[in-house]
Image (cartoon, rainbow, N blue to C red):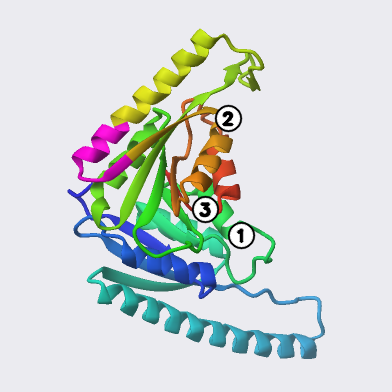
Amino acid sequence: MSEKRFKIMLAVDGSLHSQVAVQLVAGITWPPRTIIHVLAVAPDRWSFQDLSPEAQSVVAETLAQVRQLEWAAAVRLTRQTAEQLEEGGLTVEREIQEGHPSEMILQRAAELPADLIVIGAKGLCAPGEFRLGSTAHKLAHYADCSVLVVRPPERAQPLSVLLAADGSREAQQAADLLCALSLPAWAEVIVVSVAEAQAGLANGERRVVAEMPEAVRRALLDAAEARAGEVVERLCDCGAHVQNAIRFGHPAKEILSAAQEHDADLIVVGARGQTRQELYRLGGVAQKVVKYAECSVLVVR
């Protein structure tokens, strides 16, 4: 990863979660030659064609004024964000586009191309009771690259990072990403491996095993411990401060529970696990973790 320019798209809208996302990006030591591409999207306002010519003229004038104000706000926001990041020695590009936020972010991330999209969990328009805004939800599902969904942490640094290790390709890529960062400077890592208390059925569905022989349970736990051990050793070789946590049960539930127990600030999870189905861009475990986590979540592809 350090052999090429690592490009991060940071989508900003001025919301609280967006401000926290900027602070998180500024606080992490990224690989050398990393570029932060700051993007603000001014919403594309609809016009109303079924109005009278006089009313259409009034609406068009009003929308033009709104667009002008929103564009000016986006200019200020991207400039202030760039200045904040550049103070930390980061290389920054900034851009403003007009359109539907999620569609524009996905389009520009693919065109750059970006290695990582960073976005606040909720934007300016997300209702207070929602844990995940529609834009962050769509990016986590449909982006071609990794997505970091940021929620306000309980503390600044060091961050407590929980890495879900299931042996999948994406989980291995997640460990690669953490190894590329200067972990000791900003993070403590807990590697969680879950012995899944489920069985696969012929149609690809999963069901919980009510009664499991102790020998089978022990074998599953041993396999989970072996997976975690490989990742822990790898991260230790990178100089990280690491511990492991072996769990038994449903993966998403156990990851979320472990995150609460360890007071995690960031959960790192592969987009799809070992039971991956090619028609889904985001696996069931990652979906639940992104939606229900109380902290920030990095979905790795």
Would you place residue 34 above or below residue 42 in this image?
A: above
Which amino acid, mark 2? Answer: His
Verify whether residue 271 appears in magenta. no
Could you tell me which residue is drawn at 55 percent across and 41 percent down? Answer: 257
Which residue is tagged 3?
A: 139
Could you tell me which residue is drawn at 48 percent across and 79 percent down? Answer: 74
Q: Nearer the viewer, mark 2 or mark 1?
A: 2
Residue bounds of the magenta highlight? 231-242
* Residue 82 in the image, given as x and y percentages of width and height: 34, 76
Could you tell me which residue is drawn at 73 percent across and 90 percent down? Answer: 58
Circle 1 — which element? loop
Q: Quadrant of residue 39?
A: bottom left
Q: As drawn, is 180 to the left or to the right of 294?
A: left
User: How busy is the neighbourhood of tag 2: few (under 14 within 10 Å), some, or many (20 plus)?
Assistant: some
Disc on the earlier residue, 3 or 1: 1
Which residue is tagged 2?
A: 250
Disc on the earlier residue, 3 or 2: 3
Which residue is tagged 1?
A: 133
Circle 2 — which element? loop
Could you tell me which residue is drawn at 22 percent across and 71 percent down? Answer: 89
CA gap, disc 2 to disc 1? 25 Å
Would you place residue 121 above or below residue 164 in this image?
A: below
Q: As drawn, is 281 to the left or to the right of 222?
A: right
248 or 53: nearer the viewer: 248
Q: Nearer the viewer, mark 3 or mark 2?
A: 2
CA gap, disc 3 to disc 2? 25 Å
Which amino acid, mark 1? Answer: Gly
Circle 3 — which element? helix
